[in-house]
Image: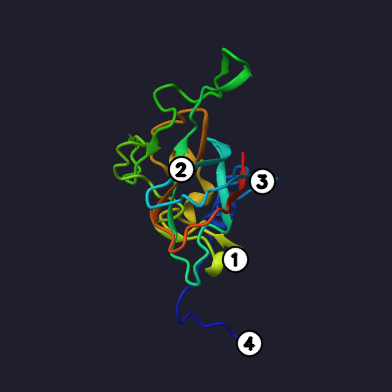
Amino acid sequence: MTLTAAGDILESAQLVALDVPPVSVPSMGEGASFDVKQNDDVIYPTAANVQYSTYTVGPRIPTNARIKSVKVYAKGIDSNATAAAAFDINLQFSDAPLGGIAAGQPVNDGTTFANAGTIPTSALTGNTTTITAYSSPNKMFGSSVVLNANSGAYKLTDVTYVNTFTFAMRDLPIWDALGFAQDPGGFFQFFLVEETASSTAAAGTIGMIVDYAV
């Protein structure tokens, strides 16, 4: 068989970097192999969940992590035959200092006091907004995503690419993907906002599962 160019003849940038002198060896998680780190967290909305209910949930991820996958599992929350509860899924700076080793001894996880608890904006320029203002939040992993299956049934949703997080961002430290000029340090967590209320609110579960490289 003879191959005749009739369209794309492409090679990935990573392979070109390895093929063309001077050879550029990719970094771990940016083309080179890596050990996947996985972390998860869970929160339990009550039957009082309404529009603009907020859920601050982990896992906490270091600001230099390269995020590979974000999944959300949910059950309950909306027991209606047609679930309506829909959520924004934002990255938020850790609300450090953490409740510490003993009362009166808070532990700072490396997140600066200026950034703690703030939300990087959708401009992806390193600017942040507050929970109270909620002005142009990043919604990086979802904008009004229905997480719950109908009639309160279990549902697992891969939200990695449902909004503004791109395939190219997989190979960037997340601080870079969010537009910061340098690593601000510390950790990110997730901030969920119920943009559309449940048709029939019910107690339930929301969990996050994140794969990343550091």
Q: In the drawing, what numbered circle is on residue 65? A: none
- The structure's colour scheme is rainbow
Q: Which one is in front in this view, the residue at disc 4 or the one at disc 3?
A: 3
Mark on residue 153?
1
Is there a contact, CB below 8 Å, between mark 1 and mark 3? Answer: no
Image quarter in which the N terminus is found = bottom right
* Foreground label between 4 and 1: 1
Q: Nearer the viewer, residue 8 or 78?
A: 78
How far is mark 4 from mark 2, CA to CA? Answer: 50 Å
Type of amino acid at the residue the image marks with label 3: Gln
Sort mark 4 into few (<14), some (14-19) or many (20+) by Cα contacts within 10 Å: few
Q: Amino acid at mark 4?
A: Met
Cα–Cα span, label 1 and label 3:
25 Å
Label 1 sits on a secondary structure element that is loop
Label 2 SS: strand
- Mark 3 neighbour density, 10 Å: few (under 14) some (14–19) many (20 or more): some
- Neighbor class of circle 1 (other Cα within 10 Å; few <14, some 14-19, many 20+) is some
The answer to whether mark 4 and mark 3 are in CB contact below 8 A is no
From the image, tell me which residue sits under label 4: 1
The answer to whether residue 144 of the structure is visible from this angle is: yes
Mark 2 is on which residue type? Leu
Sequence-wise, the earlier of marks 4 and 1 is 4
Task: Check if mark 2's residue and mark 1's residue have beta carbons within 8 Å.
Answer: no
Residue at label 2? Answer: 91
Q: CA distance from mark 2 to mark 3?
A: 17 Å
Mark 2, residues whose alpha carbon is within 10 Å: few (<14), some, or many (≥20)?
many
